[in-house]
Amino acid sequence: MPQIRLALAQVNPCVGDLAGNVDRVLAGARDAHGAGARLVAFPEMVLTGYPVEDLALRPSFQAASRQALDSLAARLVEEGLGSLVVVVGYLDVIDDGHDRLGRPRGGPQNAAAVVTGGRVVARYAKHHLPNYGVFDEFRYFVPGASTTVVRVDGVDVAIAICEDLWQDGGPVAQVRDTGAGLLVVINGSPYERNKDDVRLELCARRAREAGCPLAYVNMVGGQDELVFDGDSLVVGADGALVARAPQFEESLLVVDLDLPMADPTTSASTAAIGFPLPAYTPEPPSVAPRLSDDAEVWQALVVGLRDYVGKNGFRSVTLGLSGGIDSAVVAAIACDALGADNVHGVSLPSVYSSDHSRGDAADMAERTGLHYRTVEIAPMVDAFQGRLHLSGLAEENLQARVRGTTLMAISNAEGHLVLATGNKSELSVGYSTIYGDAVGGYAPIKDVPKVDVWALARWRNEHALERGETPPIPPSSIDKPPSAELRPGQLDSDSLPDYAVLDDLLDDYVENDRGAAELVADGFDQALVERVLRLTDVAEYKRRQYPPGTKISSKGFGRDRRLPVTNRWRETVPDQD
């Protein structure tokens, strides 16, 4: 049987940085060549970054993507890597494409190229274009229709792209008919909880269907609200795991495979490269350990924030450090992502701020080493009150808005990105002040329910203890009842149900689209259901103006869940006769 040393290059591209992405691919190709690989695969649309959204429709961007591919092919030869077979994702365009009703302008395609010897020897266009959740690919791309198989050193290698793997039928089902000995799938698959388990099962099933080993390479890094977790892997023809890359890290996964010789009488290959190699001793494959559920989420939040800050040209962040659990968790994420020296916490006490909250904020700064200052907002609030004479909720919101204005002023003066500290539970029911605690450029825990914020805080402190480090989050920030501290003795429980109940209800309503009648039938109190659903529905205008934040759930606010602001539909429970 022929042998092939395959490398999967799990890299972190940046949307629009075509020159930088070419450099990343070249660096990965060097590493693959140095490891003795014959074939190296890179993620979906790695040359342009992913997703490119409406850039896909811009002719200048389409042309730049093609030029980047040509540049890559030439530079591989210049660097002595011309014999390497490189599978790389990019944005292509149909040459004879023209405007047609119902088809994206200009004929852009989500494509893969096989590059060797200084030229592109084969191309493949993605067949299945996802149009659900965070994906709008049917808006942007023209689907492909043909299979692509290249013969590398006597082995037929089939190519597919991401969604082609997820959909029954199509290219993967056709691979068995081609007689390919290996299926290489390049991916831009965003992270969400427990997706790594789903991926492995899917790859195993598709490998058995195709009748050959399957190599799955995924990108890593953050792109706006999405974060990509890598988790590249190889499974055998029987579906058994052969090798797996680490999560959330750039990595080169190198695997030696014994593969069947292509039958020249039945082969569907469109290009032939090289000849079977003499037998050699294979290296043992690597299987990276899996992260725990909490560690996985934490790392997603860290990577999402780190790349949003870095890829958008910021170096540091600032946030209101209240002493509460949400700001403490956001500060800890920021310290892990950027280093404590690039995190600036600001205590913004009012006349209602408790001594223990001030103390917890200072303790957080001491534990992590982040920059810390105090700005008393009482004089500023008094100045507004002297003119406006507000009371009740308006007075409470005034405090939050003074805090927001102060943080934005510090951001403007010192160049920090402001982090909003709201969680998904609060965003769901509108428990935030627009232009107050909702201000900022990024919201790291926007997609994290309140009960999970506590769980992550406990995990992060336990993780620190295991490593012999100081736990970053004050225990009292975790243990005390949550409060906005905008009036005397205020607690979240004054306005909201217990968070465990609230999050359970919101999970069913927001994530799973269950209606009011179903929720009541499931055992939730009818009055609670009607109240929470109404709060969630009328808060859509607030969520539209909230900063982006890392998606970790199956349905995050923004790209996933899109509802009209002007909307009179309300879920109701039918009267029982």
Image (cartoon, rainbow, N blue to C red):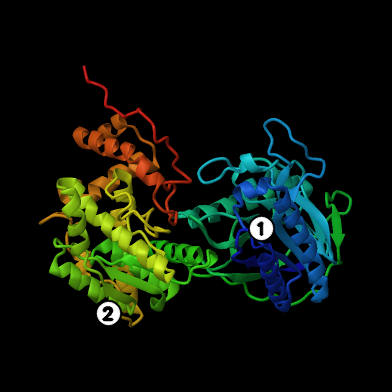
For the N terminus, give its image quadrant: bottom right
Q: Residue at x 29, y 36 (%)?
A: 533
Residue 492 seen in the figure: no
Give percent across and percent down for residue 174: 73, 44
In the rendered view, tell whether residue 212 sits above or below residue 331: above
Q: Which image quarter: residue 562?
A: top left
User: Which numbered circle lies on residue 366?
Assistant: 2
Categorize mark 2 by other alpha carbons within 10 Å: few (<14), some (14-19), many (20+). some
Kindly give the residue lying farthest to the right in the view shown: 265
In the rendered view, tell whether residue 474 sits above or below residue 125: below
Q: Amino acid at mark 1?
A: Thr
Q: Look at mark 1 in the image and give the residue it sits on.
A: 48
Whole-angstrom CA distance, mark 2 to mark 1, is: 42 Å
Q: Residue at x 34, y 51 (%)?
A: 424
In the rendered view, tell whether residue 92 sits above or below residue 97: below
**How many numbered discs sit on the rendered protein?**
2
